[in-house]
Image (cartoon, grey):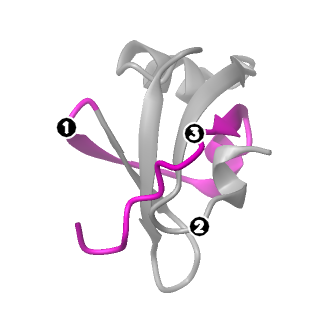
Amino acid sequence: MTLKDLKSGDRVRIAAVDPSDPGVQRLMTLGLVEGAELTFLHRSLGGDPLEFRIHGTSISLRQDQARRFRVERLEGNHVPEGE
């Protein structure tokens, strides 16, 4: 599963990153690295970009970037939409 596959409110931990895209390398400097925990907030009306919260900050990723981050769900940590 990747960041692209999530539903609003899902909390996940990054398990692996494909850093072959320079844009993904820049996102890694912002903290999107293996072991980081984040929450999927929502996707835009057209489906792209996707918005996440990490370390108290919101960040938007394009779908092609999001699919380069393999994640695992954090059990029991679904955050209801709007909280």
Q: Quadrant of residue 2?
A: top right
Quarter placement of the C terminus: bottom left
- Disc assigned to residue 29: none
State how far apart marks 3 and 1 are (Cα). 17 Å
Read off the residue under disc 2: 7
- Residue under label 1, please give it: 56
Q: Position of residue 43 (x, y in %)?
A: 49, 71
Q: Dot 2: within a 10 Å radius of its alpha carbon, few (fewer than 14), some, or many (20 or more) residues? A: some
Q: Secondary structure at mark 1?
A: loop
Where residue 80 sits, quadrant-wise, is bottom left
Magenta span of residues = 55-83
Secondary structure under tag 3 reads loop
Mark 3 residue type: Leu
Q: Amino acid at mark 1?
A: Gly
Q: Earlier in the sequence, mark 1 or mark 2?
A: 2
Q: Is residue 3 left or right of residue 33?
A: right
Mark before the other along the chain sequence, 2 or 3:
2
- On whether residue 18 falls in the magenta region, the answer is no
Which residue is found at the position 45% from the left and 30% from the top?
Answer: 37
Q: Please, is residue 9 above or below residue 16 in the view?
A: below
Disc sitting over residue 74 in the figure: 3
Q: Nearer the viewer, residue 28 or 6?
A: 6
Q: Residue at x 69, y 35 (%)?
A: 72
